[in-house]
Image: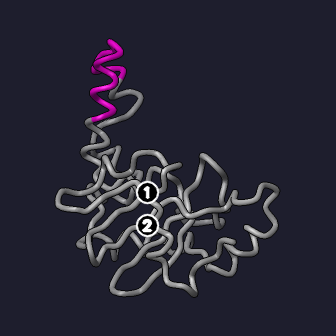
Amino acid sequence: MGGEKMEPKQGETIIAGVLFKRKFHWYCTERALWKMDYRRLYDSYHDRYRREGKGEAAFVKEVGSFGEFISSRYRIPVLDKDTAKEFLKQIAADEISAGELAYMADRAEVQGAIQPELYVNFDGRQLYAADTAERFEQYAPAGWQTARADFRSLIPEQERFWR
């Protein structure tokens, strides 16, 4: 998102482990960025507005057009292997090392407060969300393998920052 580096804040940010072109990286970003199919997300918001009896004008005023909506994620409608390079370039400032995460985890007031919530493997088209995470798998691109599961064993050993 540019500017100042984000720090993990429960409910606001997410710690996502990403495998792309056989290289693993951690990112701490806004949660919504990882709802990978923004068309599906936009449509779900639209459906919710209809169910709540809100009109089209209210929806467009509050959420915006689809073009405006995807501008919040660098104009990338579907985050997948084809768009990952551009997306990861845009969030490069949000990359965080395992060492930084381990330091934060050690200093956290609550044991286990700093935990990975998402594993995205662009190479293998896989998205795994921790049981505590919101339903990111609902917004995975078509053809992706998704699960709500403990994915920590998939993380390279040298990148495991938790205790």
Residue type at numbered disc 2: Tyr
Structural crowding at the residue carrying mark 2, measured as other residues with C-alpha within 10 Å and reported as few (<14), some (14–19) or many (≥20) = many
Image coordinates of residue 12 in percent, x first then y, are 60, 48
Residue located 55% across and 57% down the image? 14
Residue topped by disc 1: 129
> Residue 119, which numbered label?
2
Decide which of 96, 129 is in the foreground and name it.
129
Q: Can residue 47 be found in the magenta stretch?
A: yes
- Name the residue at 82% across, 66% down: 107
Image coords of residue 21 (percent x, y): 33, 85
Q: On the rendered structure, is 62 left or right of 82?
A: right
Image: magenta residue range = 44-58
Q: Secondary structure at mark 1?
A: strand
Examine the residues drawn in magenta and state their main secondary structure: helix
Give the answer, above or below, for where 130 lies relative to 57.
Answer: below
Asked if marks 2 and 1 touch (Cβ < 8 Å), the reply is yes
- Front residue of this view, candidates 32 and 19: 19
Judge whether 40 appears above or below 30 on screen.
above
Q: Nearer the viewer, residue 126 or 38?
A: 126
Looking at the image, tell me whether mark 2 or mark 1 is earlier in sequence order: 2
Q: Is residue 85 left or right of residue 5?
A: left
